[in-house]
Amino acid sequence: MIEFQAVSKQYSTDAYALRDVSLNIDKGELVYLAGPSGAGKSTLLKMIAAIERPTSGRVIVNGHDVGRIKRAGVPFLRRNIGMILQQQRLLSDRSILANVMLSLLVTGAPRAQAEQRARAALDKVDLLDRANANPMELSGGEQQRVAVARAIVNRPQIILADEPTANLDRAAADRVIDALRAFNSVGVTCMISTHDEQVLDSAGRVIRLEHGQMTGGAQ
Ligand code: ADP
Ligand code: ADP
């Protein structure tokens, strides 16, 4: 479902953010992307969603070479991908329900259907009782679970989560990972990046990155 063929990425002419990365991820896999800060984890995830493009090599998602995808094709690619990116924030001018509904409304879903599905998604991350709360009233862990709900409400085939447990305590981190694993268990391919070894568990495959190079997990 996701294939990297000798992928390298240079943001500037000297340093490599990723160097000669090759990997294969099957539909339904749970993959942890482990490595210290600066290892290239975000860069790798962004290339799957065509947020960044490889300098060389090929990134294939669902049979499409997304490094060469045209601008018009990007929305079709992203429709299949739910993203939890570090720099994405919930909108603080509206409820968490409205935040999750927005993902559906922008795709043209009718309002009543969007609300029903957003409520179902919030229920799955155990936050339905907070549907009308403002994101600012929630703990960091709860906010991340809203981000999970927002990422899955469109029923994507792939979830990309970039350091979803950063800055959370152990209990809150576990609940975020549990929510992601629940979606994986119904067939969603999940990639979760982390610099925290404690997040890794035996249920998932671990791909290791260091200085932009894979040091483990190739398959
Ligand atoms: P990680 O997610 O593992 O922390 P990143 O993919 O964010 O790693 O970064 C890998 C390397 O690429 C780092 O050296 C970082 O400074 C660099 N980098 C990331 N994004 C950019 C960018 N937009 N422009 C220039 N360098 C970048
Ligand atoms: P309902 O019929 O109440 O909408 P569903 O089980 O169809 O219940 O889905 C509830 C929510 O859970 C959906 O809106 C979606 O966000 C999420 N969901 C369910 N199945 C999947 C799946 N396979 N992939 C991603 N998200 C899913």
Image (cartoon, rainbow, N blue to C red):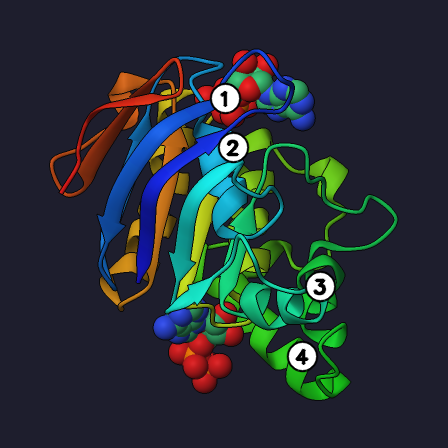
Between disc 4 and disc 1, whose residue precedes?
Answer: 1
Q: Is mark 1 within 8 Å of ligand 1?
A: yes
Callout 3: few (<14), some (14-19), or many (20+) C-alpha neighbours within 10 Å?
A: few
Element class at badge 1? loop
* Rendered view: 44 above or below 11: below
State ligand 2's quadrant: bottom left
Nearest to N terminus: mark 3 or mark 2? 2
- Inter-mark Cα distance, 2 to 1: 7 Å
Q: Nearer the viewer, residue 125 or 5?
A: 5
Could you say where residue 19 lies in the image, as x and y percent from the top left? 39, 25
Question: Quadrant location of the C terminus?
Answer: top left
> Residue shown at 72%/37% (left/top)?
137
Q: Which mark is residue 114?
A: 4
Residue type at mark 1 is Ala
Q: Which residue is mark 3?
A: 71
> Which kind of residue does numbered mark 4 sit on?
Ala
Calculate the distance from the C-alpha at mark 3 to the C-alpha at mark 2: 19 Å
Is the distance from the Cβ of mark 2 to the nearest ligand 1 atom less than 8 Å? yes
- Relative to the observer, which residue lies in front, 93 or 4? 4
Q: Reading the chain from its start, which is encountered first: label 4 or label 3?
A: 3
Rendered location of residue 138, percent (x, y): 65, 38
Task: Single out the mark in the foreground, 4 or 2.
Answer: 2
